[in-house]
Image (cartoon, coloured by chain):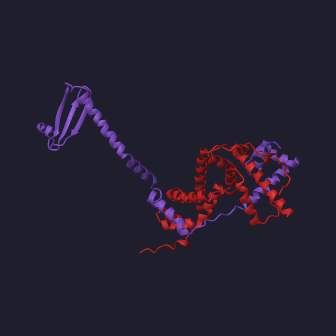
């Protein structure tokens, strides 16, 4: 039997053939001794395996085996199915520092762009929003930029701004 | 006050229901009932006690996490077995990436010699007692490559169809058929050899 015929015969045995293919194999089995011998051999091997799966038992106590599982369940999740939320929270906790750093960096870039790299634009204005809390609003109409800054009122340089 | 359920007397379905509500004691009872089956499946695939132990425990943790997805379409034990099988396949893929395929494995992929061998013993297991047969099947499994052993386990023990095996193993239907055929022929050859040895003694 060639490879294709062998695989088709096997598929016949496993109930994976339908229609024309099935009829073709049936015809081989009627006419060919080699096909019958191969099918019988495959049938015996399959029957031997299906009824005789090797058994392997754990060689430890119930308590010992459970301990690790219980720890895993406890550390990963508090209740079944709570996984997604837990993962989101973990991701946020893990990346909070990077996110905060990126935010501060961005603020510094905007600040430098406004005060260091370029002159203060003529068509811009400062506005003290809340003198008590120390909030100042800077608007740059030319660049369409608005920056809100919160400062410590005890800082000497800002005292005059009151 | 509601009385505590006597968990060992409950059915798997009742225990699953309790575990879904967060009852870890119910889940512990399920673990105790099916731990050998889950471990045995992991061992039959990995052929390594340490890996099988770790993977079986990982499967139980995953089982707890996914418990709400269990709808009862199959038995709980079958559902758990499928989880451990997936973990074994993941580990095998990881290990496979870390090592190069041996020449022997490549020869097996292409069919080896068993495929071409004539059928000289139609029933290679005839006359073997059940305990002896189980032992020999277990020994023979160790002589198959991971890929052939896995396909045999998924088809003969898990009774999965070709298509489901291909999906799990991430390979084509043709590869599944070819590996299964080779694995069966190899098992037949090994068992026939042992039978001959027994007859000669």
Relative depth, front residue between B97 and A62: B97
Relative depth, front residue between B105 and B179: B105
Query: In the displayed structure, does residue B71 sit left or right of residue A8?
Result: left
Shown in purple, the chain is A
Q: Position of residue A157 (x, y in %)?
A: 14, 37
Relative depth, front residue between A14 and B101: B101
* Residue at image coords 42%, 53%: A86
Relative depth, front residue between B122 and B145: B145
Compared to A49, does A142 lie above or below? Answer: above
Does the image show residue B97?
A: yes
Picture quadrant where residue A46 is located: bottom right
Shown in red, the chain is B
Quadrant of the frame with the C terminus of chain A: top left
Quadrant of the frame with the N terminus of chain A: top right
Compared to B159, does A147 lie above or below? Answer: above
* Residue at image coords 61%, 54%: B85
């Amino acid at each position: 039997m060639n490879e294709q015929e062998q695989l088709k015969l096997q598929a016949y045995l496993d109930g994976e053939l339908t229609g024309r293919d099935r009829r073709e194999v049936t015809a081989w089995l009627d006419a060919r001794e080699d096909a019958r011998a191969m099918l019988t051999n495959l049938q015996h091997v399959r029957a031997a395996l299906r009824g005789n799966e090797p058994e392997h038992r754990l060689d430890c106590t119930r308590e010992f085996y459970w301990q690790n599982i219980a720890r895993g369940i406890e550390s990963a999740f508090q209740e079944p199915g709570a996984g997604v939320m837990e993962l989101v929270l973990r991701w946020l906790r893990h990346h909070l520092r990077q996110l905060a750093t990126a935010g501060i960096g961005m603020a510094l870039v905007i600040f430098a762009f406004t005060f260091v790299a370029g002159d203060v634009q003529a068509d811009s204005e400062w506005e003290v929003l809340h003198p008590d809390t120390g909030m100042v609003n800077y608007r740059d109409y030319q660049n369409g930029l608005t920056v809100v800054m919160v400062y410590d009122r005890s800082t000497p340089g800002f005292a005059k701004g009151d | 006050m509601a009385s505590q359920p006597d968990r060992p007397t409950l059915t798997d379905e009742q225990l699953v229901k309790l575990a879904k509500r967060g009852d870890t004691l119910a889940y512990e009872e399920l673990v105790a009932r099916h731990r050998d089956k889950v471990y045995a499946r992991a061992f039959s695939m990995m052929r390594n006690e340490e890996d099988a132990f770790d993977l079986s425990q990982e499967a139980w943790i995953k089982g707890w996490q996914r418990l709400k997805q269990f709808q009862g379409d199959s038995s709980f034990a079958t559902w758990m077995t499928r989880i451990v099988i997936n973990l074994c396949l993941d580990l095998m893929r990881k290990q496979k990436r870390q090592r190069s395929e041996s020449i022997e494995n490549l020869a097996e992929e292409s069919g080896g010699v068993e495929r071409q061998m004539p059928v000289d013993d139609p029933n290679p297991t005839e006359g073997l007692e059940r305990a002896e047969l189980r032992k020999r099947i277990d020994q023979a499994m160790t002589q198959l490559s991971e890929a052939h052993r896995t396909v045999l386990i998924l088809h003969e023990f898990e009774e999965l169809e070709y298509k489901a095996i291909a999906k799990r193993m991430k390979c084509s239907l043709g590869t599944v058929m070819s590996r299964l055929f080779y694995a069966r022929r190899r098992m037949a050859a090994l068992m026939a050899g042992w039978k001959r040895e027994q007859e000669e003694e």
